[in-house]
Amino acid sequence: MTRHEEQGDTGRRTGRRSKGLRIAGLTLTGTLVLAAAAAGWAYWHLNHNITSVDIDSALGDDRPARAMLTPAPAGSADASPVPTGSLNILVLGSDSRSGAANRELGGGDSEGARSDTAMVVHLDAGRTAATVVSIPRDTLVTRPSCPLGSGRTSAPAYGVMFNSAYAVGGPVCAVKTAETLTGVRMDHYLEIDFSGFARLVDALGGVDVTTGQDIDDDLSHLHLAAGTHHLDGTRALALARTRHGIGDGSDLGRIGLQQTLVKALLEQVFDAGLLTDPARLYRVADAATAGLTTDTALDSLGELMSLGRSLEGLTADRVTTVTMPVVTAPSDPNRVIPEEPRASRLWASLR
């Protein structure tokens, strides 16, 4: 082969390598663009799953004092310090019938949804322990005057069921009534409807729950023998709602099942290994944000992630579940009222 032929062959090889590198570069660039677009769409989608209510503006300053939040120490290696400090979150499960999925799962009237479940979640100052306090929905309370969406206000009511607040004035009235009952500032509000809860359980792969007694409730369509069961979203929702197939059929029996379910779900979340499975993480995030209503301070994925990051030291065994102490109401044997002074001492411990 002549020098000229060798140079030509080398040129062709160099050309092919350059072309190959250009194709590889374009392929990589295209892949990165598609990945960025997919990530951007996923972030947009998850953000738009969330519905929010501006509770702070609606209620103004006539509320219990807010706990102080403390940022991470100055000079921390973390570029985005997460807050610390105690926090109280009112968590409601809504029986709204809005949407086909909720109707299929047995929600209430879309115009008259109620807070089927009410819990105050208290995070301690270091965010390494939590107390979940259930408020029986049958508790008779003073419902304060609440601002309504129409610009009017509702009249105060005395000796009415706690869950009537949501029916009268939605999340704003639920928060104000909870604060009136407890004397505790609700720093945040979270509400999930039937379909959102069922989807979340399914995205986690179901949940293992142990019941100490047989459950036969035709109204919630749940029939379980005593023991441990792996429940999908629909059956887990039925467990959270059942009350007629256990104990005396009161709301207190149902609360015990709900607390068992909460602990089981927390264990499932902590053990799920979501960070090593991006596809599953997205499914869980999509389920968790669908059917979710928050206050405006938690209405974005970034804000929810910041809250989640502040709970990295929290484990399921450091979550305590209790029920607000109650006694039978003198006016109605089917209703309860706070048992004093035990109830007041409990709420004072969360301020």
Image (cartoon, rainbow, N blue to C red):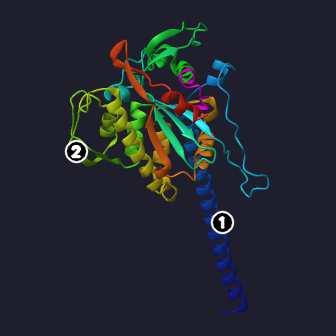
Residue 183 seen in render = yes
**In the image, what residue occupies the spot 64% across and 19% down?**
59
Residue 194 lies, with reference to residue 24, above or below; the image says above
**In the image, what residue occupies the spot 68% across and 77% down?**
14
The local crowd at label 2, few if under 14, some if 14 to 19, many if 20 or more residues have their Cα within 10 Å, is few
Q: Is residue 305 left or right of residue 280?
A: right
Q: In the image, which disc is placed on residue 150?
A: none
Disc 2 target residue: 226
For the view shown, which residue lies furthest in the front direction? 341
Q: Amino acid at mark 2?
A: Ala
Q: Is residue 71 left or right of residue 132?
A: right
**In the image, what residue occupies the spot 34% across and 40% down?**
233
Nearer to me, 197 or 59: 59
Residue 321 x, y percent position in the rendering: 45, 40
Check the picture and name the quadrant holding the N terminus.
bottom right
- Closest to the camera, between mark 1 and mark 2, is 2
- Nearest to N terminus: mark 1 or mark 2: 1
The local crowd at label 1, few if under 14, some if 14 to 19, many if 20 or more residues have their Cα within 10 Å, is few
Residue 66 x, y percent position in the rendering: 67, 31
Disc 1 target residue: 22
Q: Secondary structure at mark 2?
A: loop
Nearer to me, 92 or 272: 92
**In the image, what residue occupies the spot 42% across and 26% down?**
326
| Cα distance between the residues tagged 1 and 2 | 65 Å
Question: Was residue 277 drawn as part of the magenta stretch in this picture?
Answer: no
Q: Is residue 13 left or right of residue 230?
A: right
Residue 64 x, y percent position in the rendering: 65, 25
What is the span of residues highlighted in magenta in the rendered image?
A: 179-189
Quarter-of-image position of residue 7: bottom right
For the view shown, which residue lies furthest in the bottom direction? 1
Residue 299 x, y percent position in the rendering: 60, 33
Q: Amino acid at mark 1?
A: Arg
